[in-house]
């Protein structure tokens, strides 16, 4: 067996660039997306196109970070019955989970919680701010404990 040891970082970097490696792309793709909250219209549970772009960024981050899991928290406003609000918040959280799975994130790394209107982000009267899904990243150990 022959082992080649390269101790010239400049030579290694040139070979990587010649092979098509782009460090800027890798660095940008491996960063955790900054947007963690997604808001909905009244009685809606699907994301718009701009939100889908961000969800794909989250999926890319999760695929590149195998020790990280995500918990999806679904919420609704306080308009209507609490049973319906819990149902709607579950639809919202499940829709986001489906998007992540379609993008290649393993189902075992996704935890889903739905809260109805029990955990408002703003005052109960600010219904638009309370209709949302929030993403929470967890290390693998925390996710297993949950």
Image (cartoon, rainbow, N blue to C red):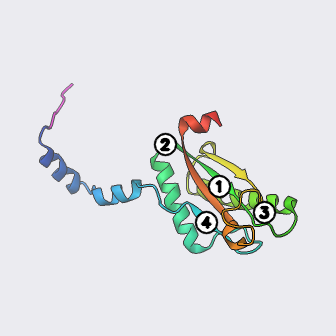
Main secondary structure type of the part rendered in magenta: loop
The structure residue drawn at horizontal position 24% and vertical position 54%, both measured from the top left corner, is 19
Q: Quadrant of the N terminus?
A: top left
Residue positioned 47% across, 59% down in the render? 33
* Residue on which disc 2 sits: 66
Res 125 → quadrant = bottom right
The picture quadrant where one finds residue 82 is bottom right
Disc 4 from disc 1: Cα separation = 13 Å
Q: Could you tell me which secondary element the residue under label 2 belongs to?
A: loop
Q: Nearer the viewer, residue 13 or 110?
A: 110
Q: Nearer the viewer, mark 4 or mark 2?
A: 4
Where does the image place residue 6, in percent across and percent down from the top left? 14, 38
The magenta region covers 1-6
Read off the residue under disc 1. 97
Q: Which one is earlier in the sequence, the residue at label 3 or at label 2? A: 2
Q: Is residue 97 left or right of residue 64?
A: right
At mark 3, the secondary structure is helix
Q: Which is nearer the N-term, disc 3 or disc 4?
A: 4
Residue furthest to the front: 123
Q: Would residue 47 be visible to someone looking at this image?
A: yes
Q: CA distance from mark 3 to mark 4?
A: 14 Å
Q: Residues within 10 Å of mark 1 (few under 14, many from 20)?
A: many
Q: Residue furthest top?
A: 1
Secondary structure, mark 1, is helix
Whether residue 22 appears in this view of the structure is: no
Q: Which circle's residue, 4 or 1, is located before the other in the chain?
A: 4
* Residue identifier under label 3: 88
Residue labelled with disc 4: 38
Query: Label 3, label 2: how many angstroms apart (C-alpha)?
Result: 30 Å
Question: Is residue 71 found left or right of 80 in the rendered image?
Answer: left
> Of label 1 and label 3, which has the lower sequence position?
3
Q: Which of labels 1 and 3 is toward the front?
A: 3
């Amino acid at each position: 067996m022959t082992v080649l040891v390269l101790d010239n970082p400049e030579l290694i970097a040139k070979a990587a660039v010649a092979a098509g490696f782009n460090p800027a792309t890798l660095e940008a793709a491996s960063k955790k997306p900054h947007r963690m909250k997604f808001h909905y219209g009244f009685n809606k549970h699907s994301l718009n196109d701009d939100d889908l772009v961000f969800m794909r960024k989250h999926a890319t981050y999760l695929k590149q970070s195998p020790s990280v899991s995500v918990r999806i928290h679904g919420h609704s406003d306080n308009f209507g019955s609490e049973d319906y609000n819990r149902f709607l918040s579950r639809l919202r959280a499940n829709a986001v989970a489906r998007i992540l799975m379609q993008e290649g994130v393993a189902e075992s790394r996704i935890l889903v919680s739905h809260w109805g209107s029990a955990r408002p982000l703003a005052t109960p009267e600010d219904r638009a701010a309370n209709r949302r899904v929030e993403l929470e990243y967890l290390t693998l150990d925390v996710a297993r404990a949950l």
